[in-house]
Image (cartoon, helix red, strand yellow):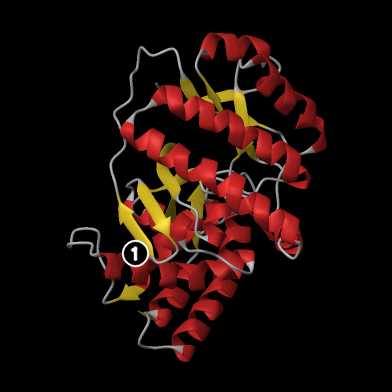
Amino acid sequence: MKGPLFYSKILLFGEYGIIKDSKGLSIPYNFFKGALKTEKTLSEAGKRSNDSLKRFAEHLAKIQEEDPSLVVFDIDALRNDLEKGMYFDSSIPQGYGIGSSGALVAAIYDKYAKNKITILENLTREKLLSLKMIFGKMESFFHGKSSGLDPLNSYLSLPILINSQDNIESTSIPSQNKDGKGAVFLLDSGIIGETAPMVQIFMEKMKHEGFRTVLKEEFIKHTDACVEDFLTGNVKSLFGNIKQLSHVVLDHFKPMIPPQFHQLWKQGIETNDYYLKLCGSGGGGYILGFTQDLEKAKNTLKEYRLEVVYNF
């Protein structure tokens, strides 16, 4: 038995800012995926997944006890399937900022939610917000607090434009220029990142007025401009804004950048060969890169593994 596939996601713009109502843009990334599977004899990884899902089932039972009007699951069927050896078979690396728990949440909702909102119906803003809220409560099992955006992206497999916390819509992005020299890429830091401690650092920083001002007047300003530029295909302006954004992150979000990448980050800004930004909460996992000349960036970053996500 094998369920439908759910893909990883990349939050191109909006990490941390969307907590404070910046714009955001999230796209599905089909290179990594996961599906629910059942096997009589589980591998070590399958057993770990099955155990985790058993605890997750109890979390879901609590959610529906607290608010049955929000969502109801077929918990008995879920427990039954788990007893038979169901697990989440996934190629999405955990702790890499590309939505491993999001894909799992989407798969469980798809299979076990009763009266679920399906991707085939007319997805009004109300329905999207409702899904986002349900997914946020489900995913909080893994992260302590979740916006619900990762599972939403994985569930819909569509780019999602976040205008503000309670204003989201599915969107389309300009089609890729496969022969273009420019690209968005993922750089593998080789370190597993933990979301919760990074969010904790951010919340501590938010207590300081100086940081709040930087967030609003620089970080959110450039993030919003990047989203606009990307969606309208204004590449020249986009790279100007990404450079500013990369600078702000290096100056004010240093704890979220693994120390061994501080110099590399700075080098990109100084040479204009590439610009780096956080992918998800940072602290490890993937780092997102933007370049107008992929060959040049590959050459400069030849010691690292790059995965191209999008071509300009």
Asked if one can make out residue 77 in the rendered structure from this viewpoint, the answer is: yes
Residue receiving disc 1: 110
Nearer to us in this view, 84 or 291: 291
x%, y% of residue 239? Answer: 50, 25
Percent across and percent down for residue 273 are 61, 15
Q: Give me the residue at 51% from left, 47% from top.
A: 90
Query: Vertical placement of 260 versus 110: above or below?
Result: above
Pick whichever, 233 or 237, lies toward us.
237
- Secondary structure, mark 1, is helix
Q: How many marks?
A: 1
Q: Quadrant of residue 131?
A: bottom left
The three-letter amino acid code for the residue at tag 1 is: Asp
Q: Quadrant of the C terminus?
A: top left
Whole-percent x and y of residue 97?
Answer: 59, 46
Circle 1 residues within 10 Å: few <14, some 14–19, many ≥20? some
Q: From the viewer's perspective, is 177 left or right of 275? A: left
256 lies left or right of 177: right
Q: Is residue 68 left or right of residue 65?
A: left
- Measured along the vertical axis of the image, is residue 151 above or below residue 161? below
Residue occupying image coordinates x 25% and y 64%:
118
Residue 107: x %, y % from top left:
40, 60
Query: At 58% from the left edge and 9% from the top edge, which residue is drawn?
Result: 296
Front position in the image: 262 or 113: 262
Q: Is residue 51 visible?
A: no
Locate the N terminus by quadrant: bottom left
Q: In the image, is 154 to the left or to the right of 172?
A: right
Q: Measured along the vertical axis of the image, is residue 141 above or below residue 184?
A: below
